[in-house]
Amino acid sequence: MQAKRLHPAALLYFWYQSLKSGLLYFFILLAFNFNERFTGYFWLALFAVLLPTVVGGILKYLRYSYELAAQEIILHSGVIFPKHLHISYAKIQTLQTKQWFYLRPFGLLSLQIETSSQAADEPEAVLPVISRAVVTQIQAKRDAVLKNDRQTEIFFPDRDSETEHIPASSEFSYQIKGHDLNLYALTSLGFLPLMLGFLAIYNRLSDVIPQKYINAAVKTLENRSGVVLSLLAIVVILLALGFSYLVVINRYFHFEVHPEEKQLVTSKGLLQQNIVTASQEKIQAVVISQSFLRQALKLATVQLVLASQAADEEQDDQLVLLPVLSQGLALKNASRLVKWLPQKIPRLPVGRRFERWKIIRNILLPTILLVVIIGLFFQPYGWLSVVLLPVAFWIGYYASVNNRLALTNADVLLAQNGHLLTRKLYLIPRGRIQAMSMQQTVLMARVELSHLKIILRSGNEKQVVQVRYLPKKKAEEIYRWYRHK
């Protein structure tokens, strides 16, 4: 089959990639140009930087081509050293398309292909700018190969083969409503790191702005009443809330998810539409997540831990399956998309009082030490940091009451923890657990307590789920259950 080139708009992509590497040399030129006026040598050097950028982008475009063979995709690239990458359709695990708003009128998008053989965090291959028809053609060829493989496996059926096929009419799909999207954005805690970001920007600006202007601003604020300062703080908080709201709306606009064969397809995005096609076999765990605010409103978010890089841009590197829905419907709707999920969750026992106290203590003691240090070195106002103590107690108490573990009748482990006022319930099938370990200190051994660590695969790395200060008998029971898989 004859090799095809990318769409001519891909030239902009290659120029952008070349420009990013050339910017370093441009800034070096600016740093060494000490004259107020740019000399002729500067413009000559700038031309020497820009010329390889433009020419290099053109050469990369001309040398980049692809072939859609019957059983594989073949990618050709390399200006000086030619490279030929062969990707079998059967080895493709995840297809991810990204489409910026300015490419939509032209029907162009970017395709990322992920396989089981990749070792880095980058996808196995990227087709930067192609038409949607090419993506459809690749998906059709990949689905045809997978269908042939499944037909071959019919000669060796197992007990589960009869229940794998689900009629299309019974398939569940989800599309976020405008009200739910607004609720999801308004209950996001993303404004907290944004406020810290504003403080970091202020510190950077204070290093750049002349000191006389800073002193004048401080003197002006000193003469203002507390009401004005309070209003200023409210404005900063509102800006952080507004920016966080817009970020969430942009990311999850028109969110949709539906099953397709043995895959899950999610679609979302306003300025950049992102479509991820992930194999259900790559699901390592399902996570029901609730911040303390969403927990109070009885809302939940369902996420997936994937053995795939498809969720790299998501929070905690977990693919969002259902952004926001009622707490009581979270498991019910998720089980219609992920078939191995149980229909009901058994009661998760709360730890004993002294077990919970140990978690609270581990957060309180460092906070007390920090408050004492701040108070001694920044007297008298440093002692105002004592307000951190009830906050630390709250965080510790929240973590302690949400530290739970249980088993279901369907060979699914339930591990729950609370971290930074966010509760996460992990539903983990036994076959997806990569490793499990029990850990205890000498003091913990005396009181028959143990930590339990569960290792999962997340992308190309591992994710550790830890439940702390469990009764030793309970930890040993779970460990034996895992060993007898």
Image (cartoon, helix red, strand yellow):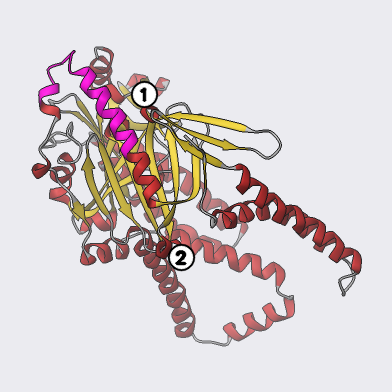
User: What is the x, y in percent for residue 285?
Assistant: 29, 34
User: What is the x, y in percent for residue 291?
Assistant: 30, 53
Q: Is residue 357 visible?
A: no
Disc marking residue 156: none
Residue designated by label 2: 102
Under circle 2, the secondary element is: helix
Identity, as a three-letter code, of the amino acid under mark 2: Tyr
Of 91 and 378, nearer the camera is 91
User: What is the x, y in percent for residue 311?
Assistant: 39, 43
> Where, by quadrant of the figure, is residue 185 drawn?
bottom left
> Where, by quadrant of the figure, is residue 238 drawn?
bottom left
Residue stretch in magenta: 140-162
Q: Is residue 231 above or below residue 151?
A: below
At 27% from the left and 18% from the top, the residue drawn is 482
Q: CA distance from mark 2 to mark 1?
A: 59 Å
2 vs 1, front mark: 2
Identity, as a three-letter code, of the amino acid under mark 1: Met
Q: Is residue 418 above or below residue 206?
A: above
Left or right of residue 9: residue 111: left
User: What is the x, y in percent for residue 274?
Assistant: 38, 53
Of 36 and 285, nearer the camera is 36
Residue designated by label 1: 444
